Image (spheres, rainbow, N blue to C red):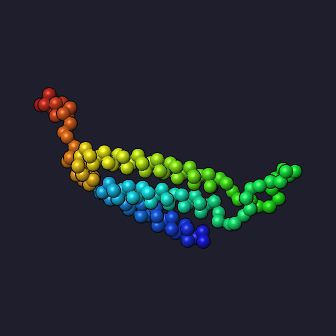
Amino acid sequence: MEAALSILSGALVAGGIYLLLSQNLVRMLFGLIMLSNAVNLMIFTAGGLEHQLPPLIDKHQVEPLTAVANALPQALILTAIVIGFALLTFMFILFYRTYEALGTIDTRELQAAEPPDLTDTESKGKTS
């Protein structure tokens, strides 16, 4: 099962990178979502998939007698989900504002849609 999840997370990383390298801002957003989910799946797989007992200790014992579940991967995944959602929200707002200001979602057209920088033209006029 761990091998299948590793292959699946690798496929998600490959698909996410492919989408991030595209020229469309919406595809970049979906690529970011895929990469976020791939990282969560990698952390989950690295934590192990064995079914173990919850980490409960009896009153008069210092440590558990049997193997217990590791809570660290669960905490890391929860943190990664929150960070991924915050990054996704920020990128969505950034892409929306870019579309509002420039009227395009194609990255090749973004540079042509920007207004010219007046400081560059003024400095070129002074030197010539």
Which residue ends up furthest to the right in the rendered image?
Answer: 60
- Locate residue 116: give its quadrant: top left
Q: Give the residue displayed 30% in from the left and 57% down from the top.
A: 24
Q: Give the residue displayed 54% in from the left and 58% down from the top.
A: 40
Q: Can residue 29 be seen in this view?
A: yes
- Residue 95 vertical placement versus 33 (above, below): above
Horizontal side, residue 128 vs residue 103: left or right: left
Horizontal side, residue 21 vs residue 8: left or right: left
Expressed as whole percent of the image width and height from the top left, the position of residue 97 reads: 31, 45
Q: Give the residue displayed 62% in from the left and 55% down from the top.
A: 74
Expressed as whole percent of the image width and height from the top left, the position of residue 23 reads: 29, 57
Horizontal side, residue 116 vs residue 56: left or right: left
Nearer-the-camera pick, 59 or 22: 59
Which residue ends up furthest to the front in the rendered image?
Answer: 59
Nearer-the-camera pick, 124 or 86: 86
- Residue 7 vertical placement versus 65 (above, below): below
Q: Can residue 111 be seen in this view?
A: no
Position of the N terminus by quadrant: bottom right
Q: Give the residue displayed 76% in from the left and 61% down from the top.
A: 67
Nearer-the-camera pick, 94 or 19: 94
Which residue ends up furthest to the top in the rendered image?
Answer: 126
